[in-house]
Image (cartoon, rainbow, N blue to C red):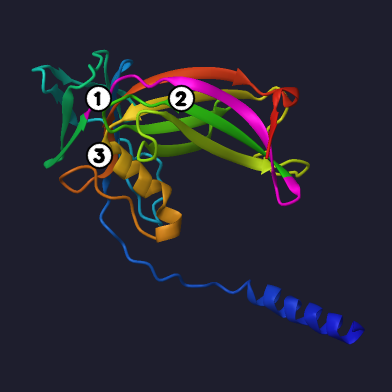
Amino acid sequence: MKRYNITILAILGLLMTSCKKDIEIDYHQVDPLYVVEATVSEDGMQARISLTNNMDNNSSKSDISEALVVITGSDGSSQTLSHKGNGIYKSSATGTPDVEYTITIDVDGRHFTSTSTMQKAPKVNDFYFIRKKIVSENFQMAKLLIQDIPNEDNYYFSHLYRNGTGYRWAVKKDDTDPNKEQQQLFTFAREGSDDKDLLREGDRIRLELRSIDRKSYDYLYSMQIMDNTGTNPIPNFTGGCLGYFSAYSHVVYNYVFHEADMKDED
């Protein structure tokens, strides 16, 4: 057994020595692609436009400052967004539920478009933290209960922030029990572990729930399953840029995590 351990250490030493050798990585240069993240909501209109960089380009200056960004609505409205710095374009004009919005972006001879219909405001029935036993271990979780909007197809995007930083997100559609209460579970970490995702006493949790349209849902769902499918998100814009455009209504709630408030569930 001792000889076996010595042999393993010798092999590890050789591997560590060989790691000092320079390794050539064969990758292909690709043309930079535009990336757009654009929204319309009760808070206003916004678009962030940037360019992707190649692996050998360490520059962080990829934000686009000279684009023409216009958002029009099926109600006849039209807004030209103003550049505010760092590739961010804004308008204080707010969206209206049931209006279909179209964004057009013209930059460097390229033309990108996308559409999205603003939905009615969602409603949170309850949100609370639970302790759930899986096999013999207890896990921290949170349960979100959404009151489904009746007599229509609904899609939801929920995002949790922890102490001001994105923590968990998910999308859901009401294909089970439409018109009734919808449930979304978030799993955090195993209790007693040193996992960085384990909630700590006094953590500030911000919940944002958006009601989104089918097109936005399809894009975000394709992002959610990327790791399992090994594919890129489905296109949301015409013209060949990455990213998405979503018109939505939303609600925001703030919580403070207290371990004593957790509910035990089987």
Q: Is residue 218 above or below residue 67?
A: below
Q: CA distance from mark 1 to mark 3?
A: 11 Å
Q: Quadrant of the N terminus?
A: bottom right
Q: Tell which circle, 3 or 2, labels the residue nearer the N-terminal end.
A: 2
Q: Residue at x 12, y 16 (%)?
A: 77
* Residue 163 sits in quarter: top right
Q: Is residue 127 above or below residue 49?
A: above
Q: Left or right? Give the position of 140 relative to 67.
A: right
Q: Residue at x 39, y 36 (%)?
A: 177
Magenta stretch secondary structure, dominant: strand
Q: Tell which circle, 1 or 3, labels the residue nearer the N-terminal end.
A: 1
Label at residue 118: 1
* Residue 255 sits in quarter: top right
Residue 135 in percent (x, y) is at: 71, 52
Q: Is residue 161 magenta?
A: no
The residue carrying mark 2 is 208
Q: What residue span does the magenta drawing correspond to?
A: 117-137
Q: Tell which circle, 1 or 2, labels the residue nearer the N-terminal end.
A: 1
Q: Left or right? Give the position of 203 relative to 161.
A: right
Q: Is residue 123 magenta?
A: yes
Q: Residue furthest bottom?
A: 3
Q: Is residue 56 above or below residue 43?
A: below
Q: Left or right? Give the position of 250 relative to 120.
A: right
Q: Is residue 8 among the parts visible in the rendering?
A: yes
Residue 103 in percent (x, y) is at: 17, 30
Q: Please state which amino acid type lies under the numbered disc 2.
A: Glu
Q: Residues within 10 Å of mark 2 (few under 14, many from 20)?
A: some
Residue 23 in percent (x, y) is at: 52, 72
Q: Residue furthest right?
A: 2
